[in-house]
């Protein structure tokens, strides 16, 4: 059955496991990322391998939402290509369940948006705000600043975030700051206070409180769990 999706021109389809690792993709997806040769398969890759960081981050946030049983339906978003050009697409993602009803992964489909209708699409402003947040998250932009980027009132921006992302703007901003700080906790030797300041938190205490609220762990515990450890070879 999956082979049928190879004949749908220009429509990308894929399946991921609970960890965001691709298990299958159709030919349009492979062509979009220049993965059509056997030497560069998509199976086993994640969005971090395929897309710019800010796009991969948004894809992960959407996947987390779907894994909680909340589908993404017709979401307007930027999707990268092999030539590093991003295009506006309409994306739908649904949870995959096993025989017992447990969610074990996600399935998605995306197609290019109608450019003629894009100027009037209510969610184009959301894409601008998400890109702005990715570039300026450490500056702690206010809702008023984000609304100015979107060209909307603060109230309209808040409604847009609730409708499309199921969270208010400042919750989304916190999630981005926390998720991006995870990389530095794992791969840098910066102190916790340095990581906190680099990602827009007032101080280490603020960082710890927000990080725990988002992940259930303290930054220190997260680092201890996931930072690569040097292996020693017995003499």
Image: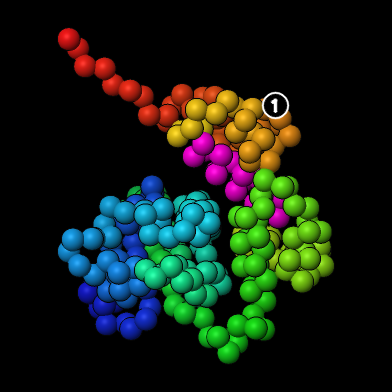
Q: Residue at x 68, y 41 (%)?
A: 200
Q: Which residues are magenta?
A: 166-184
Is residue 105 visible to us here?
no
Q: Position of residue 201 (x, y in %)?
A: 69, 37
Q: Does 82 sit left or right of 118 as displayed?
A: left
- Quadrant location of residue 38? bottom left
Please give left or right for residue 222 compared with residue 203 in the image: left
Quarter location, residue 23: bottom left
Label 1, secondary structure: give it.
helix
Q: Check if residue 180 falls in the magenta segment.
A: yes
Residue 44 appearing in the image: yes
Magenta-highlighted stretch: main secondary structure? helix
User: Residue 78 in the image: x percent, y percent?
Assistant: 52, 69
Residue 87 covered by magenta stretch: no
Image quarter where the N terminus lies is bottom left
Q: What residue do we see at 21% from left, 16% from top?
A: 233
In the rendered view, tell whether residue 60 sits above or below residue 115.
Answer: above
Residue 144 appears left or right of 188: right
The crowding category of the residue bearing disc 1, from other C-alpha atoms within 10 Å (few below 14, some 14 to 19, many at least 20), is few
Residue at the spot of label 1:
205
Residue drawn at x 77%, y 71% is 151
223 left or right of 134 in image = left
The quadrant of the rendering that contains the C terminus is top left
Dividing the picture into quadrants, the one containing residue 76 is bottom right
Identity of the residue drawn at 26% across and 17% down:
232
119 over 145 or under it: above or below: below
Q: Position of residue 117 (x, y in %)?
A: 60, 87
The furthest residue to the top: 235
């Amino acid at each position: 059955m999956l082979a049928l999706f190879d004949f749908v021109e220009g429509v990308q389809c894929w399946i991921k496991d609970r960890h965001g690792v691709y298990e299958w993709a159709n030919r349009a997806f492979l062509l979009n990322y220049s993965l059509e040769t056997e030497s560069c398969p998509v199976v086993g890759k994640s969005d971090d391998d395929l897309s710019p960081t800010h796009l991969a981050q948004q894809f992960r946030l959407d996947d987390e939402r779907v894994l909680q049983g909340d589908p993404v339906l017709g979401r307007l978003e930027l999707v990268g290509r092999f030539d590093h050009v991003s295009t506006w697409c309409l994306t739908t993602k649904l949870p995959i369940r096993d025989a017992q009803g447990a969610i074990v992964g996600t399935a998605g489909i995306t197609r290019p948006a109608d450019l003629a209708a894009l100027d009037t699409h209510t969610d184009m402003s959301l894409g601008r705000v998400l890109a702005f947040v990715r570039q300026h998250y450490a500056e702690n932009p206010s809702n008023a600043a984000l609304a100015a980027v979107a060209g909307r009132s603060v109230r309209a921006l808040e409604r847009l975030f609730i409708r499309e992302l199921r969270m208010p703007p400042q919750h989304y901003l916190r999630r981005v700051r926390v998720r991006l700080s995870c990389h530095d906790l794992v791969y840098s030797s910066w102190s916790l206070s340095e990581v906190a300041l680099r990602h827009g938190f007032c101080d280490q205490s603020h960082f710890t409180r927000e990080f725990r609220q988002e992940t259930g762990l303290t930054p220190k515990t997260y680092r201890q769990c996931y930072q690569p450890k040097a292996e020693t070879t017995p003499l």
